[in-house]
Amino acid sequence: MQYLRSSLFAVNHDNPASVSAFTSNLITIVHSVGNIQSLQLDNLDSNQTEALASALCDLRELHTFTTGRASPRHLSDDGVISIVQLAHCLASWPSLKSLTIHGAQPHTTTELVTALRLPVCALAELITDPVFITDNELMYLMATSLRTLERVTFDSIDGITNVGLRRLLDAISKKCVLPHNPTHGSPAGCQRARRTST
């Protein structure tokens, strides 16, 4: 299986038992299918985030991950895992290239993202909308992707300050080290940094 998208449109949202059963079944599928490459999750049982995060960490071949939905109908969507749990996943996903975060669950532990193992992925794309994440958390999650990020989209994001955003963009541009082209007079890396910063 290469692609898996979960949705509760066919499940009774007002029936906690239905949502819980759907989430449990999904976790079982994720545990049993280890070669998923693209995964989109939203509107799952928030009481099962630990079990879900544990299953997600086993997806070594995952290259595209989306949590939550970017839709006016889902403004209250809190994502499916916390930022701390996401950090654990990023430390287990060497193939991940695209990460989209539409909301995140509140932290359920006292763990700090910056105290965890660094991510092992090199992202090309990051999209966040809406989510609460601090400057330090964002920098830590992106630590291994500063050379590879080509597209960054922030929309309705809380927690990040202007100083933190500038620090991230400066770090991305400084890591864009490409050979100087004497014919055109400027490194191609500078062009990529400007596109990323918009």
Image (cartoon, grey):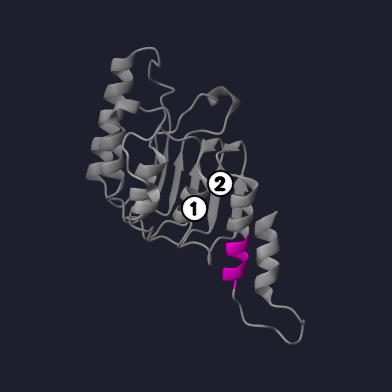
Q: Residues within 10 Å of mark 1 (few under 14, many from 20)?
A: many
Q: Which dot, 1 or 2, sits closer to the camera?
A: 2
Residue at image x 42%, y 54%?
A: 63
Residue at the disc numbered 1: 98
Q: Which amino acid type is marked by label 1?
A: Ser
Which disc, if any, is residue 186? none
Is 106 left, or right, of 186 in this rendering? left
Residue at image x 60%, y 57%?
A: 167
- Residue 37 in view (yes/no): no
Which disc, if any, is residue 127? 2
- Percent across and percent down for residue 137 are 46, 48
Residue at image x 62%, y 62%?
A: 170
Q: Quadrant of residue 188?
A: bottom right
Could you say whether the residue bearing mark 2 is in a helix, strand or loop? strand
- Percent across and percent down for residue 36 are 34, 49
- Percent across and percent down for residue 138 are 50, 50
In the image, farthest residue toward the bottom: 182
Q: Please report the bounds of the magenta region as a residue range.
A: 170-176
Of the pair 76 and 6, the residue shown nearer to us = 76
Of the pair 194 and 93, the residue shown nearer to us = 194
Q: CA gap, disc 1 to disc 2?
A: 8 Å
Is 48 left, or right, of 126 in this rendering? left
Confirm or deny contact between disc 1 and disc 2 (CB under 8 A): yes
Is 172 in the magenta? yes
